[in-house]
Image (cartoon, grey):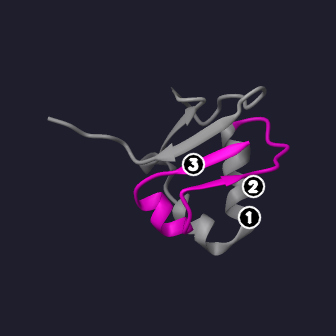
Amino acid sequence: MRVLYFAWLRERIGTSREEVETSAATVSDLVAELKAREPRYEAAFADLSAIRVALDQEVAEFDAPLAGVREVAFFPPVTGG
């Protein structure tokens, strides 16, 4: 599946996108797999309350299933005014 990183997540991980082979059932499982890879992923995902996720361009929760998902995007909360 394609994993996209935006803003400071992209900066901490060092890439904007990658193809990931995963057996993760949920977004949380995927995050756990990514965090176990390298310290840069651990640092990027240290505070999940500061991260949002979208599955195939639809905002989702971390407990959302990944079955059939082609793209996961991680990004900081968007504020406006």
Q: Considering the numbered disc 2 on the image, is that residue within a helix, a strand or a loop?
A: helix
Q: Nearer the viewer, mark 3 or mark 1?
A: 3
Q: Mark 2 = which residue?
A: 33
Q: Mark 1 = which residue?
A: 36
Q: Considering the numbered disc 1 on the image, is that residue within a helix, a strand or a loop?
A: helix
> Is 65 located above or below residue 29 in the figure?
above
Residue type pointed to by label 2: Glu
State the CA–CA distance, disc 3 to disc 1: 18 Å
Q: Which residues are magenta?
A: 1-26
Residue type pointed to by label 1: Ala
Quadrant housing residue 28: top right
Residue type pointed to by label 3: Leu
> Is 40 located above or below residue 32 in the figure?
below
> Are there few (<14), some (14-19), or many (20+) residues within 10 Å of tag 3?
some
Judged left or right of residue 1, residue 43 is left
Disc number placed over residue 4 in the picture, else none: 3
State the CA–CA distance, disc 2 to disc 3: 15 Å
> Are there few (<14), some (14-19), or many (20+) residues within 10 Å of tag 1?
few
Work out whether residue 74 or residue 31 is closer to the camera in this orientation and state it.
74
